Image (cartoon, rainbow, N blue to C red):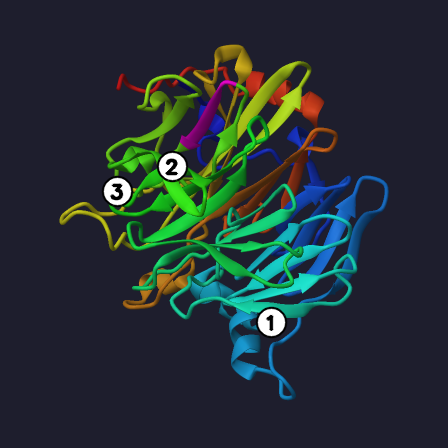
Amino acid sequence: MTRRHPDRATERGVSGARGDPLDLGPEARIGGVRDGRLYWTRGRTVGFWTPSGGRVALGTLPTPGDERPDAAFRLRHGRFAKAALRPVVGSWTTTNLWPLRDGTLLATVGRRVFRSGDHGRSWAPVRRLPDSSGPMGTLPTSVCLHGGDVYLAEYTLGDDPARILRSEDDGRTWETHVETTAVRHFHGVFRDPYRDVVWATAGDADDESAVGRLADGEFVRAGSGSQRWRAVGLAFTPTAVLWGMDCSYAASVELLRLRRGGPAEPETVGRTDASAYYAATLPVDGELWVAVATAAEVGEDSTAPAGRGNRSGDAARVLVASSASSYETWYELAAFRRRRPLGERLPGVPTASAYVFLAADERLGLFVNPFNARSDAGSVIRVPPEALPRLADEASAVDASAPDR
């Protein structure tokens, strides 16, 4: 079941009185939350935010090159170049940021991986990703900590094998941990907070789409074989693992629950109108909330069957559900229309999709970060923990139940 308020279906989000907008500047991208800090980037500028200190800039991710700056790198990833092209193609991001531990940060800018050991003040390149990597190099879901190791999932779009890398020295050096040609690429790696295990998601064709675990240097599938197993982000609860289908051409995009120790097939617990990308969990007053963000995608999926075009909705959404309903009742917390740039009127000009990036912290709450949206574009909105149940309740004024499976 999905509940949606009609007035918020395509325009309104959790901004204004319904959330706390953070002053991080235009086109800010959130990274992760650690030790009470929300880490963010703007272009190649890195910083953090706290409730008491507000926005703090730390440093700038460098331009690779031994002695001469890489001009092409600056053009592709510089804030001013992106600002000049924004009216034509929309906003896009090529930077990811992950706080690790003890002041260590990891970042990707395009195909470069950088590491900082001094809270982001200085950076060093530590890895070059394959040339076939996507514009962001990896996805925001591509790094996790497990035990003493750091895992990084490459996101290749060509003929390279799919790989998950592992570092045993906080990102200074890397080795291949998993390599396979059975999937196109990995979408993410995730530490299971309730089990001593690392999970991964993979795509994109039916036989490549899989959710599974890492064991002894192998990717062991929990299930695969259809677009129901094509996931990006995972949300973990004590009793289940949840995700939304990452499929822009599906007749119905399902929100799915795989019970721990239960049936081998996931159960449909909700539906939405566009690919689900990112997920976050937040405990509130004894209940565990799961948030899932969808994307308003443009372009066609190269792995789609013939005649199956992109049917993504016009808005990127944030959907939430709680353990009180066993994650079977979903509320639309926010929706952001995709920005329509001038390039849409020009044949052959690529334009950007709209996304909502998520982060969550038990004390700070849920952070909602729409990107390339017509309103609230590049903003960061904080939903305090105590406000989440109230906002979900407000969103349930009209019941728009999903059709039966």
Amino acid type, label 1: Phe
Camera-side residue of 301 and 119:
119
The residue tagged 1 is: 80
Image point 18% across, 45% down: which residue?
A: 308
In the image, residue 28 sits, relative to residue 292, either above or below, namely: below
Q: Residue furthest bottom?
A: 68
Instruction: Tell me the tag on residue 249.
Output: 3
Instruction: Tell me the tag on residue 342.
Output: none
Image point 33% across, 18% down: which residue?
A: 263
In the image, residue 23 sits, relative to residue 41, either above or below, namely: above
Asked if the residue under mark 3 is in contact with the one under mark 2, i.e. CB atoms within 8 Å, the reply is no
The residue tagged 2 is: 211
Q: In the image, which is nearer the foreground, mark 2 or mark 3?
A: 2
Camera-side residue of 367 and 158:
158
Say which element carries label 1.
Answer: helix
Magenta segment range? Answer: 239-243
- Image quarter where the C terminus lies is top left
In the image, residue 282 sits, relative to residue 102, either above or below, namely: above
Image point 44% across, 25% down: which residue?
A: 6
Image point 28% across, 19% down: which residue?
A: 403
Going from N to C along the chain, the mark reached first, 3 or 1, is: 1
Q: Residues within 10 Å of mark 1 (few under 14, many from 20)?
A: few
Amino acid type, label 3: Tyr
Q: Could you give the CA–CA distance between mark 2 and mark 3, rounded to whole angstroms?
A: 20 Å
Say which element carries label 3.
Answer: loop
Q: Determine which quarter of the picture holds residue 399.
A: top left
Q: Could you give the CA–CA distance between mark 2 and mark 1, rounded to whole angstroms?
A: 39 Å
Amino acid type, label 2: Val
